[in-house]
Amino acid sequence: MVSRKNTSRRSSGFVEPCRLSKAARPPSGPLWVHEIKHDGFRLMVRREGSRVRCYTKGGYDWADRFPAIVEAASRRKASSFLIDGEAVICRDDGLSDFNALRSRPRDHDAILFADRA
């Protein structure tokens, strides 16, 4: 059962991402896609017309926190889409830096990693 508190914080248009599950080994076959685990925030980036939202797993819209991701999504030719990805800040050596991402309330350096299936 979803509590009233959880329902009220979710914005219209929120789509809950798939959750991870443990397995002894990864599945195989042509219908499976595997992605690298980045150390960042999972985001569902949704564009509807000129509006772009960046939803967290909990349903919060963090578009104001990731202006570079919103700007990049706004430049796409499609006027409607949903991208499941990971917001990350990379260090100079190319590795993700979760502490940098978490400590900045508004970040222009964050990028979105998303796989294309």
Image (cartoon, helix red, strand yellow):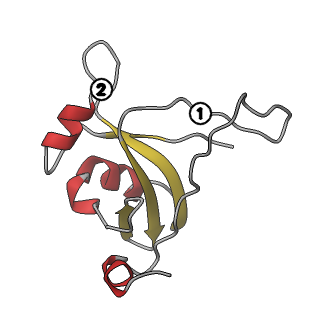
User: Which label sits in the foreground, 2 or 1?
Assistant: 1
**Residue at coordinates 32% horizontally, 67% vertically from top-left?**
60
Q: Is residue 57 above or below residue 51?
A: above
Q: Are marks 2 and 1 in contact (CB under 8 Å)?
A: no
Give the Cα distance between marks 2 and 1.
Answer: 17 Å
Residue 101 in picture, x, y percent from top left: 23, 39
Within 10 angstroms of label 1, few (less than 14), some, or many (20 or more) residues? few
Whole-percent x and y of residue 103?
A: 13, 41
Q: Quadrant of the C terminus?
A: top right
Image point (54%, 63%), residue name: 81
Percent coordinates x, y for residue 89 in the rendering: 28, 33
Looking at the rendered structure, the secondary structure element under dot 1 is loop
**Vertical arrangement, residue 59 with respect to residue 90, above or below:** below
Query: Residue 27 shows which numbered tag?
Result: none
Mark 2 neighbour density, 10 Å: few (under 14) some (14–19) many (20 or more): some
Query: Which numbered disc, 2 or 1, marks the residue that appears first in the sequence?
Result: 1
For badge 1, the amino acid type reads: Glu
Residue 100 horizontal/vertical position (percent): 18, 33
Please tell me in which quadrant of the rendered image residue 74 appears. bottom left
The single residue placed furthest to the right in the displayed view is 29
Q: Is residue 95 left or right of residue 25?
A: left
Question: Which mark is on residue 35?
Answer: 1
Q: Amino acid at mark 2?
A: Cys
Which residue extends farthest top?
Answer: 93
